[in-house]
Amino acid sequence: MSNCFELLGLTPRAAMDDDLLEKAYLDAAKVLHPDHASGDSARTSALNEAISVLRSPSRRLKHLMELNSAVAWKAIPLEPSLMDLFAAVGRQLESAGKVTEKAKSVSTALSRALLSGEILKVRESLEDLNGEISSHIDSYLHELPGLDARLSQGDSTVWSDAQKLQVKLAYLEKWQTQIRERLFQLMI
């Protein structure tokens, strides 16, 4: 993969302002779009991949590490609070899956009405869990500027901390996506 930051004309950083990122993407897309005289589809595809990587904090951190560090991949255990959250996510997704299967099998309006209370309860639980995950993500995103400051000071220990943070964000983003998919499936 090419340097996503370079493709969008951005300074490589862990913390990224969403508005700046969108502006850089739109500016580059104007020039690289296949309908533009200097554009082509391969470069547009690379640009779309770059914005996808940089929009995700965990993927952005991973890309930054790939570009700048010699830190070897290693398994990083999750802290107990995230392990507890993981267990809760698993239980709620399983519960939502069962309710989704029930909803698929009902054929009458009465059956759907009787199931609606259960669906509502599961949706509320998933939404609460999604809010908890969002809070964790927000707290970790506040650490990104500190990583950037340490990078600019040449702190060599930053990559190990960046790797730990990237893993946490990757798990949280994955769980959030799974919850959103279940919520979508539960829409009646």
Image (cartoon, rainbow, N blue to C red):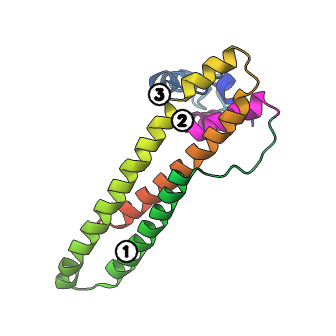
Label of residue 140 in the image: none
82, 181: nearer the viewer = 82
- Circle 2 crowding by C-alpha within 10 Å: few under 14, some 14–19, many from 20: some
Q: Which amino acid does the dot numbered 1 rest on?
A: Thr
Q: How crowded is mark 3: few (under 14 residues within 10 Å), some or many (20 or more)?
A: few
Query: Which sits in the foreground, 23 or 65?
Result: 65
Q: Where is residue 29 in the image (x, y as percent from the top left)?
A: 56, 27
Q: Measure the C-alpha gap from mark 3 to mark 1.
A: 34 Å
Give left or right: position of 184 versus 143: left
Q: Can residue 52 be seen in this view?
A: no
Query: Is disc 2 placed on a helix, strand or loop?
Result: helix
* Residue corresponding to mark 2: 55
Neighbourhood count class around disc 1 (C-alpha, 10 Å): few under 14, some 14–19, many 20 upward: some
Q: Mark 2 and 1 residues: CB-CB less than 8 Å, in contact?
A: no
- Magenta range is 44-70
- Which residue is tagged 1? 100
Q: Name the residue under label 3.
A: 18
Residue furthest toward the front?
Answer: 80
x and y percentages locating residue 163 in the rendered image: 68, 39
User: From this viewpoint, is residue 173 visible?
Assistant: yes
Q: Which residue lies furthest to the top in this view?
A: 153
Quadrant of the frame with the N terminus = top right
Name which residue type carries label 2: Arg
- In the rendered structure, are the residues bearing label 3 and label 2 in contact, judged by CB atoms less than 8 Å apart? yes
Q: Is the residue 134 above or below the residue 51 in the image?
A: below
Classify residue 112 by image quadrant.
bottom left
165 over 111 or under it: above or below? above
Q: Earlier in the sequence, mark 3 or mark 2?
A: 3
Residue visible at 55% across and 53% down in the picture: 80
Q: Which residue is drawn at 64% across and 34% down?
A: 61
Type of the residue with mark 3: Asp
> Real-space Cα distance between discs 2 and 1?
30 Å
